[in-house]
Image (cartoon, rainbow, N blue to C red):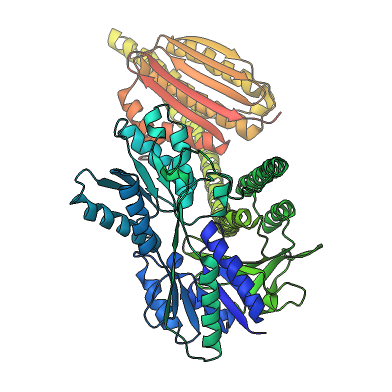
């Protein structure tokens, strides 16, 4: 069986659906298999291997999309093609002539009804059908102006649907509340339906007197505006000629290049021809039939509202999915409500262009059988799906899933005239859902890549940290060795002072006393005694203390008592730290306190010193403070040390810092001029 393709935009509005259904009937009569493709490019259509193509050019090609016209003219050199609705160079075409019927409509309105003020509510500005209808409207207004100067006409462009008609006319009336019109000429019936509803909502009765006309003569005129004056497009004749012309092309018969079908003016009462608000086309309908019709219409309205709600909820649900399984779950529910019994979802392996020979099948439904392939890659060709034996070959629609400039895949499904428009409306949600899933997958992949990078960097940081810890350990070992050497030097120094200098000073003191006959010698003798006392004290302070025997508390207390006696400085002492520290920690804490007290004696001019040692469950805290004059130099040195700009200058301060590091304690010096100095030592403990 030979295969014909019908190429159009989307089966979601009356004109394209009507063309499809009539083409389907004609191709069935001639024994062709019809595949309707929507949302494709011509380069994609090549992959279907069609024997012939019918293209709805009036919908596909606009003045803004002239590139497709050239592409189509190139396409016909490879595949027999017939253009519907628009004449193209070298392409056999079938068109509808609207000029004669539109001219007759304007003549009827101006000459028969004597209307003078008109408004044309059009479709998209650059759409070919709209351009042709608007052109006739403007031409007739211009030609009648010479004979009837009052004749005027305005044009407003929108879309070919009902809500556009409502919005366009409502906005016009709002901006021109007293600029009453005689008649509104609409580019199609759906715009006329919207304009009619906008007039019904107006409280000013002058607007409701306005006439309305449409174009297309769609079936809905019976239920929405049954008395609509409109122009009928003989689509049956149009499609029959188009299919016959393509059949001749395929069979290489001689054909006429261009065929034209004339539209027909249908006059009813909406233009003002009678006082009837509505007219019934079939006057043989009984009252019971009317009631049945009303009941049927009510049921159809309920069903359509249910379909609309289903599609709306479907779109809302797809905003929260994060994988293909979630997408398929919601698609199943949608198909059940819309009664779609054949549906295939295929993903593209190339986002820029569809590779029909390599598609990933994700979900397949045929009658009551459903298959999911979300957990594995099922690679198929588009032709293999189209060639399945258990599908109706003349009801298959192939829709391209596009989001932005990227192709996400295809949907191959069986046409259902009652729910097709709703299903088509859901395709944009499916495309966006696939895009959302792709973005989530990209984020997951990126997260994994970042996690790997973090792990690698963490390993590097661990190596660096370990190296720094080793260096810190070595530094502590060096500092410990320095402190041990310092203790040894202290011992040697104190012994030298005691055994040598003190002995010499003692001998000098005894000799001075034996010869002291003058007051000056007595004063010299006292000075020598004082020097001897101080030297012995230095030797005593420098000599290592055995803290194992007396404990840190007693050693610090003794240090404070001696300071108070020798330096005549009031010393307040409070110690609450238990004797459970190591000997190394005790020695370093003692030396830090000793050095701090020596600095106070030498530099502070203080009259009071406070030494405290407190503890809690987390740390011990030792504070040595005085009420002396402070030291600006000490502030500067301490600040530089904290900022890492410089090490404290001075052996005592450096020794205190080394000892604090040695026991992993924090060490801080605060000095405020005229308020004294405060040394704080904090060591974390584990009890």
The residue shown at (71%, 28%) is: 687
Residue 119 located left or right of residue 652:
left
Residue 520 located left or right of residue 428:
left
One can see residue 655 in this view: no
Residue 82's spot in the image, x, y percent?
Answer: 48, 78
Image quadrant where one finds the N terminus: bottom right
**Relative to residue 48, is residue 513 depicted above or below?**
above
**Disc count in the image?**
0
Residue 657's spot in the image, x, y percent?
Answer: 47, 34
**Relative to residue 549, is residue 148 depicted above or below?**
below
Residue 136's spot in the image, x, y percent?
Answer: 31, 59
One can see residue 675 in this view: yes
Q: Nearer the viewer, residue 448 or 257?
A: 257
Residue 678's spot in the image, x, y percent?
Answer: 44, 20
The residue shown at (52%, 66%) is: 235
Q: Quadrant of residue 210?
A: top left
């Amino acid at each position: 069986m030979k295969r014909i393709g019908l190429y159009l935009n989307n089966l979601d509005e009356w004109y394209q659906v009507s063309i499809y259904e009539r083409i389907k009937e004609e191709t069935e009569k001639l024994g062709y298999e019809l595949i309707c493709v929507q949302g494709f490019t011509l380069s994609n259509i090549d992959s279907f291997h069609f024997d012939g193509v019918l293209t709805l050019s009036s919908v596909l090609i606009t003045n803004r999309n002239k590139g497709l016209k050239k592409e189509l003219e190139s396409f016909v050199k490879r595949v027999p093609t017939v253009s519907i609705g628009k004449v193209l160079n070298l392409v056999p075409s079938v068109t509808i002539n609207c000029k004669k019927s539109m001219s007759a409509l304007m003549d009827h309105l101006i000459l028969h009804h004597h209307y003078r003020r008109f408004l044309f509510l059009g479709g998209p500005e650059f759409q070919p059908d709209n351009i042709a209808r608007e052109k006739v409207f403007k031409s007739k207004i211009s030609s009648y102006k010479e004979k009837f100067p009052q004749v005027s006409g305005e044009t407003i462009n929108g879309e070919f649907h009902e809500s556009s008609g409502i919005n366009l006319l409502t906005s016009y009336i709002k901006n021109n509340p007293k600029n009453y019109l005689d008649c509104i000429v609409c580019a199609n019936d759906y715009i006329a339906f919207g304009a009619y509803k906008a007039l019904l909502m107006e409280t000013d009765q002058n607007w409701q007197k306005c006439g309305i006309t449409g174009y297309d003569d769609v079936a809905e005129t019976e239920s929405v505006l049954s008395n609509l004056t409109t122009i009928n497009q003989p689509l049956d004749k149009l499609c029959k000629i188009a299919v016959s012309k393509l059949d001749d092309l395929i069979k290489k018969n001689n054909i006429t290049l261009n065929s034209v079908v004339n539209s027909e003016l249908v006059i009813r009462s909406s233009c003002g021809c009678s006082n009837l608000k509505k007219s019934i086309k079939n006057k043989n309908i009984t009252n019971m039939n009317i009631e049945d019709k009303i009941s049927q219409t009510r049921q159809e309205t309920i069903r359509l509202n249910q379909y609309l709600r289903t599609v709306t909820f479907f779109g809302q649900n797809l905003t929260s999915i994060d994988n293909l399984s979630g997408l398929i779950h919601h698609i199943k529910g949608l198909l059940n409500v819309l009664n779609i019994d054949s549906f295939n979802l295929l993903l593209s392996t190339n986002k820029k262009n569809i590779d029909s020979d390599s598609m990933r099948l994700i979900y397949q439904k045929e009658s009551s059988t459903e298959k999911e392939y979300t957990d594995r890659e099922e690679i198929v060709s588009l032709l293999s799906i189209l060639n399945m034996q258990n599908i109706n070959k003349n009801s298959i629609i192939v829709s391209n899933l596009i989001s932005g400039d990227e192709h996400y895949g295809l949907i191959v499904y069986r046409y259902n005239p009652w729910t097709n428009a709703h299903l088509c409306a859901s395709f944009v949600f499916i495309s966006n859902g696939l895009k959302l899933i792709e973005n989530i997958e990209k984020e997951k992949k990126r997260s994994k890549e970042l996690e790997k990078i973090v792990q690698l960097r963490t390993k590097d940081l661990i190596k660096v940290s370990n190296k720094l810890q080793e260096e810190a350990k070595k530094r502590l070992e060096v500092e410990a060795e320095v402190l041990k050497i310092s203790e040894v030097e202290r011992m040697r120094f104190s012994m030298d002072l005691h055994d040598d200098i003190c002995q010499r000073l003692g001998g000098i003191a005894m000799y001075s006393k034996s010869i002291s006959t003058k007051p000056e010698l007595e004063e010299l003798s006292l000075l020598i005694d004082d020097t001897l006392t101080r030297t012995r004290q230095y030797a005593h302070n420098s000599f290592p203390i055995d803290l194992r025997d007396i404990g840190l508390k007693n050693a610090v207390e003794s240090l404070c008592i001696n300071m108070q006696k020798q330096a005549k400085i009031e010393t307040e002492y409070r110690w609450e730290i238990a004797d459970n520290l190591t000997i190394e920690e005790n020695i370093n804490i003692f030396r830090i306190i000793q050095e701090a007290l020596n600095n106070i004696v030498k530099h502070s001019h203080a009259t009071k010193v406070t030494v405290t040692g407190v503890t809690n469950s987390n740390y011990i805290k030792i504070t040595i403070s005085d009420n002396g004059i402070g030291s600006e130099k000490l502030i500067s040195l301490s600040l530089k040390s904290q900022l890492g700009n410089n090490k404290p200058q001075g052996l005592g301060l450096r020794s205190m810092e080394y000892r604090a590091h040695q026991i992993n304690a924090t060490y801080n010096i605060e000095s405020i001029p005229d308020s004294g100095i405060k040394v704080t030592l904090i060591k974390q403990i584990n009890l």
